[in-house]
């Protein structure tokens, strides 16, 4: 049996955080395309403040496509290489603001002073009137949109000039072959301004996800305001994943409606961690024991469209990427400080599993202790997740046809044998297995012997 036929329908995105364009292209060819992922989301491409920290990407200086991740030709060639491997490209776009420094040089050699850049002068910005024009009241939607986030010069996105300049930048990315956008700091831009900018473009993209954090307790801005534009990062999901795997148990995943999340499934871009949250304590991050099985749950679950963060280990939260940003992986993991989470066997093998189950509904929900859950997706796939510190031995009820299935968490189906655990599903749909501690098993019709 082969899983490759399912690859084309994958919706799974990898956030290739800080990977150079050249290394993203190579990884599309070497692993991401063959593994069947749908998209890579790359770091911002526009000229930014020159500096070693990763976050200089979010300090725009101009819309010239040249920064530490590569130049215009390298960007275009990365998009072409990924497309040839069957992978679409999502660009991270910084349209809320420009640089926060008083003056300096950008990655394409342009100089600037605060509020004066290649494309803009001081009349193109918001000055909201608070001290330092900073957002002071995070329950005030007007301040969130019109004051400065982190001292970053806040573009007046309601003005025609700013809108047409930004639309020109986005059209340029589309000309370079980009398929989708991740809109940075969308929460800080009026949805009607984003709509107007997109409407002014000549081109278009097929996928949009937006960074609009939902802060518990209410923040004056809600993700639901953005769903007419595209998907929204499901921060509530990521926060809940952390509390579920740490404290609350996994029972709520039988019916996430009970959690009252702000985003319906079709609008939710789910994630376990992003580049910001892996640097704070709000979500799980790569150092947590349950990090990988949380991904298995996200990818097996019908809620949302998942993004897998592929990042690097760090001790200094400001540190830029290892190896000059040239991402490297090895086997089913990383190389040096690059983590290559997208290559983890449990994560990569859930991509064709997820594509195969498609929109089939959750069936045969079962639990052991509060950290042990199992469920199927129609008659195509079944997963058991054990977040407890001891094995979970049980007889599981599935809707799968009788047969021998390969557990794709521990291996694959190759040349008629399972390289990992084999699971025998009987004529009544049941099987008996032991799910290792802090691990999972996943079987589906695409990996049988
Ligand atoms: C985002 N989403 O809305 C990004 O996901 C997030 O990574 C960005 O912050 C933020 N919005 C602005 O685009 C990052 C860092 C900040 C950094 C900022 C600008 O998390 O720490 O701010 O990018 O580079 C840094 C300094 C600030 C300083 C600011 C301006 O940390 O202290 O005020 O630069 O110079
Ligand atoms: Ca703004």
Image (cartoon, rainbow, N blue to C red):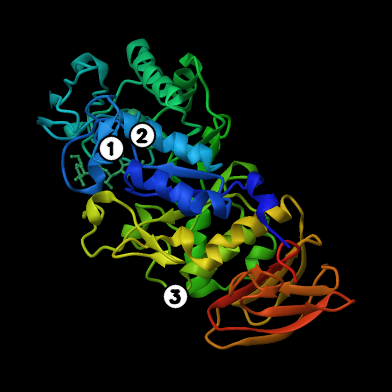
Q: Which residue is mark 2?
A: 75
The correct choice, above or below, for 286 with respect to 358 in the image is below
Element assignment for label 1 = strand
The correct choice, above or below, for 327 with respect to 192 in the image is below
Q: Nearer the viewer, residue 37 or 61?
A: 37
Q: Which residue is mark 3?
A: 289
Q: Residue at x 36, y 56 (%)?
A: 311
Element assignment for label 3 = loop
Q: Which is more foreground, mark 2 or mark 3?
A: 2
- Which badge, 3 or 1, is on the more N-terminal residue? 1
Asked if labels 2 and 1 touch by Cβ distance under 8 angstroms, the answer is: yes
- Disc sitting over residue 70 in the figure: 1
The alpha-carbon separation of the residues under discs 1 and 2 comes to 7 Å
> Seen from this angle, which residue lies furthest top?
160
Q: Residue at x 64, y 49 (%)?
A: 7
Horizontal relation, residue 183 to residue 5: left or right: left
The C terminus sits in image quarter: bottom right
Element assignment for label 2 = helix
Residue 73, x across and y down, in percent:
33, 30
């Amino acid at each position: 049996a082969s899983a490759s036929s399912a690859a084309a329908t994958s919706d799974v995105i990898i956030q290739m955080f800080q990977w150079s364009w050249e290394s993203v292209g190579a990884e599309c060819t070497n692993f991401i395309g063959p593994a069947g992922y749908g998209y890579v989301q790359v770091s911002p491409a526009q000229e930014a403040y020159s500096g070693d920290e990763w976050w200089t990407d979010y300090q725009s200086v101009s819309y010239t496509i040249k920064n530490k991740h590569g130049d215009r030709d390298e960007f275009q060639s990365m998009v072409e290489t990924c497309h040839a491997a069957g992978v679409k490209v999502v660009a991270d776009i910084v349209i809320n603001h420009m640089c926060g420094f008083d003056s300096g040089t950008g990655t394409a050699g342009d100089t600037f002073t605060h509020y004066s850049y290649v494309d803009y002068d001081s009349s193109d910005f918001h000055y909201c009137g608070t001290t330092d024009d900073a957002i002071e009241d995070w329950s005030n939607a007007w301040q969130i949109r019109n004051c400065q986030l982190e001292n970053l010069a806040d573009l007046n996105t309601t003005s025609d000039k700013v809108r047409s300049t930004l639309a020109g930048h986005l059209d340029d990315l589309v000309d370079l072959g980009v398929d989708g956008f991740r809109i940075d700091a969308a929460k800080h831009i009026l949805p009607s301004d984003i709509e107007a900018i997109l409407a002014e473009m000549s081109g278009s993209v097929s996928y949009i996800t937006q960074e609009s954090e939902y802060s518990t307790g209410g923040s004056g801005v809600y993700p639901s305001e953005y769903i007419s534009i595209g998907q929204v990062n499901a921060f509530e999901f990521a926060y809940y994943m952390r509390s579920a795997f740490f404290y609350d148990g996994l029972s709520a995943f039988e019916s996430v409606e009970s959690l009252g999340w702000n985003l319906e499934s079709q609008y939710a871009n789910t994630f376990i961690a992003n580049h910001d949250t892996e640097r704070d304590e709000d979500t799980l991050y790569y150092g947590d024991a349950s990090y990988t099985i949380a991904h298995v749950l996200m990818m097996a679950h019908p809620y949302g469209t998942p993004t897998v963060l592929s990042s690097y280990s760090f001790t200094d939260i400001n540190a830029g990427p290892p190896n000059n940003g040239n991402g490297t992986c090895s086997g089913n993991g990383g190389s040096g400080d690059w983590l290559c989470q997208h290559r983890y066997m449990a994560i990569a093998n859930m991509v064709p599993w997820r594509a195969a189950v498609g929109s089939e509904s959750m069936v045969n929900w079962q639990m052991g202790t509060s950290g042990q859950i199992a469920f199927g997706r129609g008659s195509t796939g079944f997963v058991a997740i054990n977040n407890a510190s001891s094995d979970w031995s049980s007889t599981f009820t599935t809707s799968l046809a009788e047969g021998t299935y390969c557990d794709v968490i521990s291996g694959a189906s190759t040349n008629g044998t399972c390289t990992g655990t084999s699971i025998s599903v009987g004529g009544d749909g049941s099987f008996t297995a032991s799910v290792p501690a802090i691990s999972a098993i996943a079987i589906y019709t695409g990996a049988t012997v």
